[in-house]
Image (cartoon, rainbow, N blue to C red):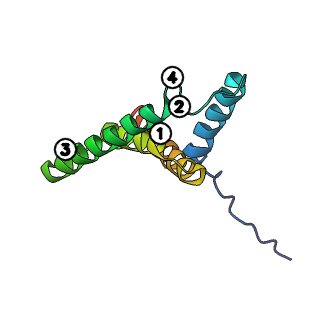
Amino acid sequence: MTEMTTAKRGGRKADPVTAILAEIKALVKDRQGEPLPLRGGLNSESGRLHYVEQEGRWSAINAARSVAGTLGKDGLILEDAFAALGEVDDADVRRALVLLAAEAISAVEDIDRRSE
């Protein structure tokens, strides 16, 4: 009787996003404390309008950079941050913050990939 041997597979490569999310999770635990409003300052509506203005500014900058072939994550992150802070509805704020987090995680992934 002959026994069949199966080739062992190599271990699955760790998902880099999983490691980044673990870091984020630890930082979130460290920063838990008294809840703060999304927008600080004496007049949060004035601040929100400023963020809307800055989102428009960074949107135009990113459009020009895209045409010139010089678009970078920096501009996208800033545009997304201002967009999130400029939203009114909680669902829209949440969606924009998740997009911002995705952009930031993508940037961290790129940094990690360069240092491998």
Name the residue type under label 2: Arg
Residue pictured at 75% horizontal, 67% vertical: 5
- Which x, y percent locates residue 75? 31, 39
Residue pictured at 53% horizontal, 31% vertical: 39
Asked where in the image residue 56 lies, by quadrant, the reply is: top left
Q: Is residue 19 left or right of residue 99?
A: right
Q: Which residue is mark 3?
A: 70
In what element is the residue under mark 1? Answer: helix
The first of marks 2 and 3 along the sequence is 2
Q: Which residue is mark 1?
A: 85
Name the residue type under label 4: Leu
In what element is the residue under mark 3? Answer: loop
The residue closer to the viewer here, 48 or 98, is 48
- Vertical comparison of 47 with 93: above or below: above
In what element is the residue under mark 4? Answer: loop
Which disc number belongs to residue 42?
Answer: 4
Which of the two marks, 3 or 4, is nearer to us in this view?
A: 4
